[in-house]
Image: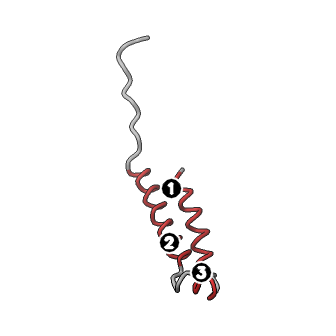
Amino acid sequence: MIGGLFLVYGVILTVTGLFDSAQEVQKAEGIRINLSTGIAMLVVGAAFLLWERLRPTDAPAPSDEEE
């Protein structure tokens, strides 16, 4: 769930960062902060989702006792 949210917000920030105006970049001292933060969020979200796929939780072993 968290990985998916990171991906969604990462896409939003990346697209916003691609279309930032020169004035917005100047306000951030020449750094495209939306673009770099969006790319970082995409990487983190992908890492979370990859981790979830590679290490799924194991189901508990059934007990021998009857209840």
**Residue placed at 59% from the left, 83% from the top?**
27
- Residue 20 x/y as whole percent: 62, 82
Q: CA distance from mark 2 to mark 1?
A: 14 Å
Residue 29 location, x and y as percent? 52, 84
Which numbered disc flags the more N-terminal residue, 1 or 3? 1
Q: Horizontal and vertical percent for residue 24?
A: 62, 82
**How crowded is the residue under tag 3: few (<14 C-alpha within 10 Å), some, or many (20+)?**
few
Residue furthest toward the top?
67
The correct choice, above or below, for 42 with respect to 2 in the image is below
Q: Is residue 36 left or right of residue 59?
A: right
Q: Which mark is residue 3?
A: 1
Regarding mark 2 in the picture, which secondary structure is present there? helix
* Mark 3 residue type: Leu
Residue at disc 3, secondary structure: helix
> Distance from label 1 to label 3 (Cα)?
22 Å
| Callout 1 secondary element | helix
Camera-side residue of 27 and 55: 27
Few, some or many residues within 10 Å of mark 1 (<14, 14–19, 20+): some
Which residue position is annotated with label 3?
18
Q: Nearer the viewer, residue 1 or 65?
A: 1
Residue found at x 62% / y 75%? 16
3D distance between C-alphas at marks 3 and 2: 11 Å
Answer with left or right where residue 18 lies relative to residue 60. right
Given contact means CB atoms under 8 Å apart, are the residues at marks 3 and 2 in contact?
no
Q: Nearer the viewer, residue 31 or 2?
A: 31
Please provide percent x and percent y for residue 23: 63, 87
Where, quadrant-wise, is the C terminus in this rendering?
top left
Horizontal placement of 20 versus 58: left or right?
right
Say which label, 3 or 2, has the lower sequence index. Answer: 3
Q: Amino acid at mark 1?
A: Gly
Residue labelled with disc 2: 39
